[in-house]
C-alpha cells in the first residue's frame, strides 16, 4: 500500500514539474533583434589622451623643512611638479615657463621657501638620454612664476646648493654636455640671486661636477666631486685624471684636491658632509671592484678610509652613485643605486630599504625630522614620514 502511494505521488510531482517547465518555455519572450553599428556614426569623434601621461624617471626632489605637506619633484622629460598635500595631488608648475623639460636638481631656500632654484638637464647618464637642459630657473613666489637665470650651455646640472641664511648665495654643480667636450663644466657661484655667475672650479673640458655638498655649520666650506666622462654612441666612458674630490674653505674662491686614501683611478663620485657632525664626510666612489665603494672621512676630508666595497651600492656606477648623510645621526647614511640602501653603522654595512620602485636617483631628508623624506626614482616621487 505504501509503495502504491509513493508511486502515485511521484507521478503527480513529475507531471507538475513538466507542466511548470512548459509554461515557462511558452512565457519566454522572443530575443530582441541584433543591431549593428555603422562606422560612419563615429567619424566625427576624435581620440584624446585621458592619462596617465608624462611619467618617467624622477632625478630631482626637494621639500620644505617647516611644511611636511609641501614637496617638489623634477622629471627627465616631464618638467617640475609640486604637491601641497604630501603627494596626494601633484600639479605641474613648469609648463609654459620652462623651455626644456629635463630637470637635473631642485633646491628650496631654507630661509625663504618661496625662493626655488631648478637646474636643468638630467644628471644620471645612461644609454638613453631624454634631453639636455637650458641652465637655471628661479622662482621667488613658490613656483608660480619662473625666470631663466642663465648658464644655458651647462646642459646637465647635478646639484644646486643654497646658502642656509642668504638665498642670494647659490652654487651650481655643472656636469656639462654628455656627448662632447665643453668649457661650461664645473662649479659656479652667484652672490646676487643668480643675476651673475662666476665659475669657481674648472678642471678640464672633459670633466664636470658630479656632486656638491655644503657644511651647514660653516657655509664657507664646500665639498665637490668632479667626473671625467663621455656618452659615446656605443658606450659610456667613465673615469680619468679629472675624477677627484675637492674642498673649499673660503666659499668657493679656492679649492684643494683631497684624495688621500682614495683609489688612484676613479670614475663617478658622490659626496655628502654630515649635518650632524661636520668632521664626517661620506663619498661613494666608482673604481676597480676591490676598491670601489663607500669611503668615509672623520677629519673633514684630510684622509679617507674604505668602509665597504659591497657591490650592491656600486653597480652601474655612471647611472647612480648618489650618497646622502643623515642630518640628525652621523652614523646613518644612504646610498642610492638600483635599490635604495641604508647604513646605520657609519657606512660599514648596507641593507636595501623597501620602497615603491627601483632605480633611485635623488633624496631629500628633512633636516629637522630625519623620518620625513622624499625619494626620486624611476617611478616618480615617494614621500615617507617613518
Image (tube, grey):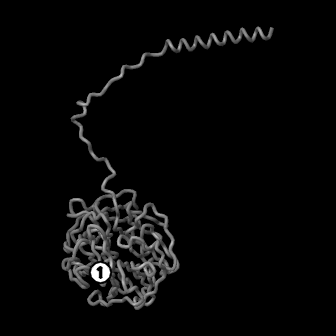
Residue sitting farthest toward the right: 1
What is the x, y in percent for residue 309? 47, 78
User: In this view of the protein, which residue sits in the foreground, 107 or 9?
Assistant: 9
Total labels drawn: 1
Rendered position, 255 above or below 364: below
Q: Is residue 371 above or below residue 202?
A: above
144, above or below 108, in the image: above
Please indicate, yes or no, whether residue 170 appears anywhere in the rendered image.
no
Q: Residues within 10 Å of mark 1 (few under 14, many from 20)?
A: some
The quadrant of the rendering that contains the N terminus is: top right
Residue at screen point 67% across, 9% down = 12
Question: Which residue occupies 33% across, 23% down?
Answer: 35
Who's the residue at 35% across and 85% down the image?
245
Q: Secondary structure at mark 1?
A: loop
Instruction: From this view, report whether residue 333 is shown above or below residue 143.
Output: below
User: Residue 187 is drawn in which quadrant?
Assistant: bottom left
Give percent across and percent down for residue 95. Answer: 24, 59
Name the one closer to the observer, 71 or 338: 338
Q: Position of residue 21 (x, y in %)?
A: 56, 14
Is residue 236 visible in the rendered image? The answer is yes
Give the side of residue 331 with respect to residue 199, left or right: right
- Disc 1 target residue: 166
In this orientation, which residue lies closer to the viewer: 273 or 229? 229
Amino acid at each position: 500500500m505504501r509503495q502504491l502511494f509513493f508511486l502515485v505521488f511521484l507521478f503527480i510531482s513529475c507531471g507538475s514539474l513538466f507542466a511548470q517547465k512548459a509554461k515557462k518555455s511558452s512565457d519566454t519572450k522572443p530575443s530582441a533583434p541584433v543591431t549593428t553599428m555603422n562606422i560612419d556614426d563615429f567619424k566625427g569623434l576624435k581620440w584624446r589622451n585621458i592619462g596617465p601621461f608624462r611619467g618617467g624617471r624622477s632625478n630631482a626632489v626637494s621639500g620644505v623643512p617647516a611644511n611636511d605637506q609641501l614637496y617638489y619633484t623634477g622629471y627627465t622629460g616631464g618638467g617640475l611638479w609640486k604637491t601641497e598635500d604630501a603627494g596626494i595631488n601633484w600639479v605641474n608648475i613648469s609648463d609654459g615657463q620652462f623651455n626644456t623639460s629635463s630637470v637635473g636638481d631642485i633646491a628650496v631656500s631654507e630661509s625663504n621657501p618661496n625662493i626655488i632654484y631648478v637646474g636643468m638637464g638630467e644628471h644620471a647618464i645612461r644609454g638613453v638620454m631624454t634631453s639636455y637642459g637650458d641652465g637655471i630657473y628661479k622662482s621667488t613666489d613658490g613656483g608660480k612664476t619662473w625666470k631663466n637665470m642663465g648658464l644655458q650651455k651647462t646642459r646637465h646640472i647635478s646639484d644646486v646648493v643654497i646658502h642656509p641664511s642668504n638665498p642670494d648665495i647659490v652654487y651650481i654643480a655643472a656636469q656639462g654636455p654628455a656627448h662632447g667636450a665643453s668649457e661650461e663644466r664645473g662649479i659656479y657661484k652667484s652672490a646676487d640671486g643668480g643675476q651673475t655667475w662666476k665659475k669657481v672650479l674648472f678642471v678640464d673640458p672633459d670633466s664636470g661636477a658630479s656632486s656638491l655638498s655644503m657644511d651647514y655649520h660653516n657655509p664657507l666650506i664646500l665639498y665637490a666631486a668632479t667626473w671625467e666622462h663621455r656618452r659615446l654612441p656605443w658606450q659610456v666612458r667613465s673615469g680619468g685624471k679629472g675624477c677627484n674630490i675637492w674642498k673649499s674653505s673660503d666659499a668657493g674662491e679656492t679649492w684643494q684636491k683631497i684624495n688621500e686614501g682614495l683609489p688612484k683611478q676613479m670614475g663617478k663620485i658622490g659626496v655628502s658632509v654630515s649635518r650632524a657632525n661636520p668632521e664626517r664626510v661620506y663619498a661613494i666612489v666608482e673604481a676597480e671592484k676591490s676598491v670601489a665603494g663607500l669611503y668615509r672621512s672623520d677629519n673633514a676630508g684630510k684622509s679617507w678610509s674604505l668602509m665597504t666595497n659591497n657591490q650592491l651600492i656600486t653597480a652601474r656606477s655612471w647611472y647612480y652613485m648618489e650618497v646622502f648623510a643623515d642630518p640628525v645621526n652621523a652614523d646613518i647614511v644612504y646610498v642610492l643605486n638600483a635599490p635604495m640602501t641604508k647604513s646605520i653603522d657609519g657606512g660599514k654595512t648596507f641593507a636595501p630599504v623597501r620602497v615603491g620602485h627601483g632605480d633611485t636617483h635623488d633624496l631629500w631628508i628633512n633636516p629637522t625630522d630625519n623620518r620625513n623624506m622624499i625619494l626620486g626614482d624611476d617611478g616618480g616621487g615617494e614621500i615617507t614620514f617613518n
